[in-house]
Amino acid sequence: MRIVALIIGLAVAAWGGVIVYRALFIEPSATAIINESTGAIHQYPNMLRVTSGLIMLLCGACAAFFAARRKPM
């Protein structure tokens, strides 16, 4: 059972990491703010996807850590 929890935890953590990476660096930005006075364009990533990916990453890493940890008898 611990091995299954470890594998599932690692899979969830990896999946969350991929979501965070794609939301921050690969996919087009969700918001673009154009400032007319300076002519600057600011693009921001989809923060809902970044937050959900970080939560998945942390939960999966914690599950894998606690599944892999030896418990005292």
Image (tube, helix red, strand yellow):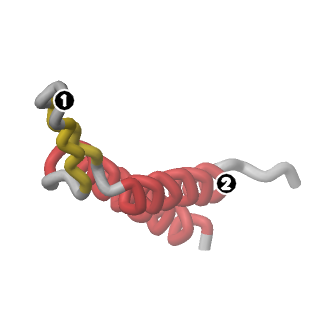
Instruction: Identify whether 5 is placed above or below 45.
Output: below
**Residue type, mark 1 in image:** Ser
Q: Secondary structure at mark 2?
A: helix
Residue 69 picture location, percent across and down: 67, 49
Residue 37 picture location, percent across and down: 19, 29
Distance, label 1 to label 2, CA atoms, is: 53 Å
Residue located at (23% from left, 45% from top): 33
Q: Nearer the viewer, residue 28 or 19?
A: 28
In the rendered image, which quarter contains the C terminus? bottom right
Instruction: Identify whether 70 is placed above or below 42.
Output: below
Residue located at (54% from left, 51% from top): 58
Local crowd at mark 1 within 10 Å, few (<14), some, or many (≥20)? Answer: few
Q: Indicate which disc residue 66 carries.
A: 2
Residue on which the image places disc 1: 37
Residue located at (51% from left, 71% from top): 4
Answer with the quarter of the image where residue 48 lies. Answer: bottom left
**Residue type, mark 2 in image:** Phe
In the rendered image, which quarter contains the N terminus? bottom right
Q: Secondary structure at mark 1?
A: loop
- Locate residue 6 relative to residue 68 in the image: left or right: left
Is residue 50 visible in this depiction of the protein? Answer: yes
Instruction: Identify whether 38 is placed above or below 12.
Output: above
Is residue 10 visible in this depiction of the protein? Answer: no
